[in-house]
Amino acid sequence: MIQEEKQLLLKDLSARLMYGIICKCLHSNNVKATAIDTEDSSVYYFDCDEWESIEYCKPYLRPMSSMTDEEKKELFEIGCEGNIEYPYGMYFRCQDWLNAHHFDYRGLIEKGLAIAVTEENNPYKK
């Protein structure tokens, strides 16, 4: 993993911690990331009581294409109008919503830095 990819993943995971981001790490497939150390590029998993290098972390994220019509409507209602690059405060509400619903708006799946959530592979499904 190159430095640019590490930085992108650290930035993305940091924004998702409060939303219960689940990752595949070196020793487990479905663990919640609970802390980030940007100094040494590592992720803490409370369930395992382990810090691991960001290189071994792959979050489970939903492709943007998996957004349902109902979710699109909800996103539209908070002012995103289908565009996550909306100016000013709207952008942050949109980003928070996308993080809370585990959408991959940074293209991490295509870069091989995240795992696509599917119907068969959904650690968020209760």
Image (cartoon, rainbow, N blue to C red):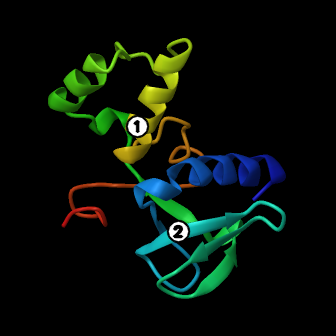
Does residue 53 lie above or below 90 as drawn? below
Which part of the image, by quadrant, shows the N terminus? bottom right
Residue at the spot 61% in from the left edge and 75% down from the top edge: 44
Q: Secondary structure beneath disc 2?
A: strand
In the rendered structure, find residue 98 and report the number of the disc placed on it. Answer: 1
In primary-sequence order, the first of circles 1 and 2 is 2
67 with respect to 48 (left or right):
left
Residue at the spot 15% in from the left edge and 29% down from the top edge: 70
Q: Which amino acid type is marked by label 1? A: Leu
Q: Can residue 19 be seen in this snapshot?
A: yes
* Occupied quadrant, residue 75: top left
In the rendered structure, find residue 52 and report the number of the disc placed on it. Answer: none
Q: Can residue 112 be seen in this snapshot?
A: no
Q: Secondary structure beneath disc 1?
A: helix
Does residue 57 lie above or below 31 as drawn? above
Position of residue 85 measured from the top left corner of the image (x, y, whole percent): 53, 18
Position of residue 26 measured from the top left corner of the image (x, y, whole percent): 59, 81
Q: Which amino acid type is marked by label 2? A: Ala
Kindly check if marks 1 and 2 are in contact, taking CB atoms under 8 A apart as contact.
Answer: no
